[in-house]
Image (spheres, helix red, strand yellow):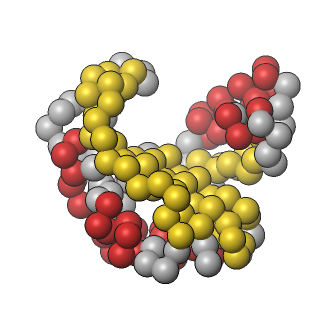
Amino acid sequence: MHLARRGMNVTAFDLSATAVGRAASLAKEAGIKVETHVSDWNQWDWTKQFDMVVGIFIQFVGQQQRAKQFADMKRALRTGGRLVLHGYRPEQIGRGTGGPPNAENMYTEAELHAVFAGWTIERSASYECDQTSGSAHVGKAALIDFVVRKP
């Protein structure tokens, strides 16, 4: 919603029909256009080209599948396009404030710098923040932001 409110053309997908329906409803209420799709990761057409690919808390796979996720996102970006990732760091384990149960699913700056070597890093930040996002995501969280441009 945030990007669409700022005039960007937004295409979004999620595995959850409920989440997609909620996004479509919120967009309609706000009077903005968001193209929404119900799709799992492997059904999505990663040959489509975008100026920006955004992944927010998409940490539901281990290292091997994540390599494919990163390759898919890279393929979907036009030259000069921006990739934005926001998620949890391994320090999140045991906090009870959200996130996947396995540290291997979480990002580290070292991993992201290695995967996107040769890309222009615009932001790479590990930090702690209080969050309130539903009943299961309340309290201190170990977060990471990573923004890079495709060469």
Identify the residue shown where x is 30% and y is 41%.
127
Identify the residue shown where x is 22% and y is 51%.
90
Q: In this view, does 150 lie to the left or right of 118?
A: right
How many marks overall? 0
Identify the residue shown where x is 65% and y is 39%.
20
Q: Can residue 88 be seen in this view?
A: no
Looking at the image, is 9 positioned above or below residue 44?
A: above
- Nearer to the camera, 65 or 143: 143
Q: For the C terminus, give its image quadrant.
A: bottom right
Residue 48 rendering spot, x and y as whole percentages: 74, 70
Q: Quadrant of residue 140?
A: top left
Looking at the image, is 143 positioned above or below residue 43?
A: above
Q: Can residue 143 be seen in this view?
A: yes
Residue 142 rendering spot, x and y as whole percentages: 27, 40
Q: In this view, does 56 lie to the left or right of 91?
A: right
Residue 70 rendering spot, x and y as whole percentages: 48, 70
- Nearer to the camera, 141 or 113: 113
Identify the residue shown where x is 81% and y is 26%.
28
- Nearer to the camera, 122 or 79: 122
- Nearer to the camera, 63 or 148: 148
Q: For the N terminus, give its image quadrant.
A: top right
